[in-house]
Image: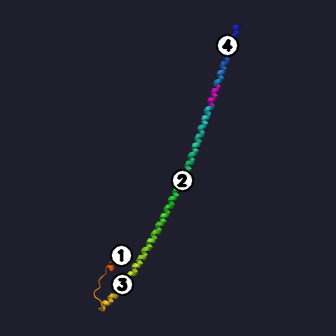
């Protein structure tokens, strides 16, 4: 009897040990599954945050590129306008210079005619071009008139 009780008790203890080990293994498996699930969730969150940060970075990059393009276009427009203004001022100066040269030529023509008239009346000798006349003639040729 004692022996049967002892065997029965040992079997009961062994069975309890097996059940406890099964529970421990089940708990370990659950904990492992929970850890795995948390790990997957964290990876998902990290990937989501990375995608969001990348998207935000792309938006900021595009905004900066747009701003830089706009500034470049403004600089180009200002440069073009400046060149047009400079070109206009240059043309105006050339026109003023041409008019001044024309006035000088008309004046000199009047003087030359006066000299020629004086020479015809034998009041003056042979006419010689002055260095100033030669310089004015050269300038007139360079300006294309």
Disc 4: which residue: 10
Q: Is residue 2 above or below residue 124?
A: above
As drawn, the residue found furthest toward the bottom would be: 121
Q: Is residue 21 above or below residue 111?
A: above
Q: Residue 64 got which mark? A: 2
Circle 2 residues within 10 Å: few <14, some 14–19, many ≥20: few
Residue 16 position, x and y percent, is: 68, 18
As drawn, the residue found furthest toward the left would be: 126
How would you classify the magenta stretch by its main secondary structure? helix
Residue 5 position, x and y percent, is: 70, 10
Q: Which residues are magenta?
A: 26-33
Q: Which image quadrant for residue 112?
A: bottom left
Q: CA distance from mark 1 to mark 2?
A: 53 Å
Label 1, secondary structure: give it: helix
Mark closer to the chain start, 2 or 4: 4
Q: Residue 139 got which mark? A: 1
Q: CA distance from mark 1 to mark 3?
A: 16 Å
Q: Is residue 89 magenta?
A: no
> At 32% across and 88% down in the image, what residue appears?
116
Q: Is residue 60 left or right of residue 114?
A: right
As drawn, the residue found furthest toward the front would be: 131
Q: Which image quadrant for residue 45?
A: top right
């Amino acid at each position: 009897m004692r022996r049967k009780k002892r065997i029965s008790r040992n079997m009961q203890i062994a069975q309890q040990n097996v059940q406890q080990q099964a529970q421990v293994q089940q708990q370990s498996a659950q904990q492992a599954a929970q850890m795995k699930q948390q790990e997957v969730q964290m990876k998902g969150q990290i990937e989501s945050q990375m995608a969001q940060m990348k998207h935000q970075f792309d938006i900021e990059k595009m905004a900066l590129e747009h701003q830089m393009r706009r500034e470049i276009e403004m600089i180009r427009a200002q440069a073009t306008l400046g060149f047009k203004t400079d070109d206009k001022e240059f043309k105006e100066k050339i026109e003023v210079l041409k008019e001044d040269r024309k006035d000088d030529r008309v004046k000199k023509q009047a003087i030359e005619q006066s000299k020629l008239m004086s020479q015809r009346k034998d009041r003056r000798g042979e006419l010689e071009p002055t260095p100033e006349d030669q310089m004015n003639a050269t300038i007139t040729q360079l300006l294309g008139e």
